[in-house]
Image (spheres, rainbow, N blue to C red):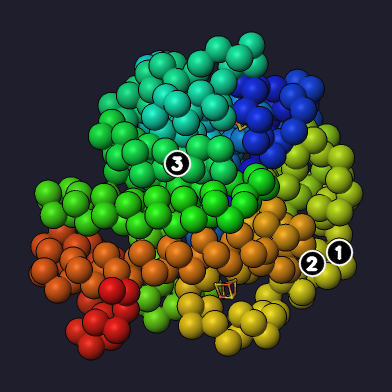
Amino acid sequence: MELTLVLTHACNLGCPYCYMGRKFGRRMPEQIAEKALAWTFKRLRPGDELQIGYFGGEPLMAWDLLQKYHLRAMKMAQAKGLHRFKGTVTTNATLLTEEKMDWLAAHDVVVAVSLDGIRAAHDATRPFVNGRSSHKETLRGLRVALARAPLTEVICVVDSSTVAHMAESARFILDQGVRVLSLSMNYAAAWDETSLRVYEAQLERVGDEFERRFRSGEDVYIAGIDAKIIGRLKGGLKECDRCSFGVGEVAVAPSGNLYPCERLVGEDNDPAWVIGHIDRGVDTEKLSGINRRRVALDPVCQACAIKDRCMNTCGCSNAFSSGDAAVPGALLCLSEQLNARVADRVAKHLFWEGNPVFLRKYYYENELHAAQPPTLMELSAAGD
Ligand code: SF4
Ligand code: SF4
């Protein structure tokens, strides 16, 4: 199960694309955090797994709450006999210090850092609230995180205003020593034909960079590309790879409102996405109404060659791209197709070359050797 606590609506950055909306500073009251843990643990059985995400705003602005409730949850997990328990925190890293990172690493909290790449891109989308650049502080925080956790993920949002920097930004981020990178298209931005063509060309260049890194012996993970390669080798995404929107996953807002995903909390004022309250539990009728529609693929998707490895059932991505959790929007559809095309191209090249990093990562480390690997003919048919 995944529980996300939105610890605060406050943030020290003023990113124009922020889907959490206005920063009115509301913190999660302690009794809401306590109820959220009690509610969650009541649903868990010995041997289950739990991941708690700490989210904001900027969650490190509620550092005391994060520490207090993570320690509480750790004790509860131990008493319950959970099989696995960990925390995650998504941060802009400007407030991340060595002491905080030591604490997080020592308490099994995995950190993800938001950094939009080179300074020109990052400054356009992730300034401090007073407009000053946060690039230097974010890079400092990232270095602190990487020194203790080399697999720290960087989330880089690609906006239509910064898309021309995408490949250079990906390269810049990987040059910082980052091995896990997510390039996340901002579906809510204003994309036109020109910016989409730039996106396509830039994504191909990101694919070139992926190949170049593997050839120089680096094992990097670039989310969109990597997931499409794994999806193909596994013969499609399995149920466990897909989003568990509202079922295995729930987010709690500072007000106590429950949401199927933390990305939909926003300013906590859209009843369309509220699936209950911590005092009353989940409104199962409302949730199953959302989910019934979400898992039924529309006829266009049914006929699509990449339907088995497409994220078209991710409720929040659908909501951001089309306004409806059940319907993949045009931008999601396009980016999934482009990611699959680039992934197939780079996989074909690296497989044909017998690249040892590629073969080890995808055929052995992922235990895919137990599955049926694609034949050379299949790989030849993919990409150019
Ligand atoms: S750092 Fe995160 S929460 Fe803060 S404004 Fe930027 S996107 Fe929003
Ligand atoms: S790529 Fe587009 S058409 Fe194909 S399955 Fe995904 S959303 Fe549907």
Q: CA distance from mark 1 to mark 2?
A: 6 Å
- Residue flagged by tag 3: what amino acid is it? Ala
- Please provide percent x and percent y for residue 267: 79, 35
Q: Quadrant of the N terminus?
A: bottom right
Q: Which mark is residue 164?
A: 3
At label 1, the amino acid type is Lys
Q: Residue at x 86, y 54 (%)?
A: 272
Q: Residues within 10 Å of mark 2 (few under 14, many from 20)?
A: many
Instruction: Say the numbered circle drawn on residue 290.
Output: 2
**Could you tell me how far apart the alpha carbons at marks 3 and 2 are, in whole angstroms?**
36 Å
Q: Amino acid at mark 2?
A: Ile
Which label number is shown at residue 286? 1
Most foreground residue, 293 or 115: 115
Q: Residue at x 61, y 80 (%)?
A: 301
Can residue 288 be seen here? The reply is yes
Residue plotted at (52% across, 70% down): 310
Q: Nearer the viewer, residue 103 or 98?
A: 98
State ligand 1's quadrant.
Answer: top right
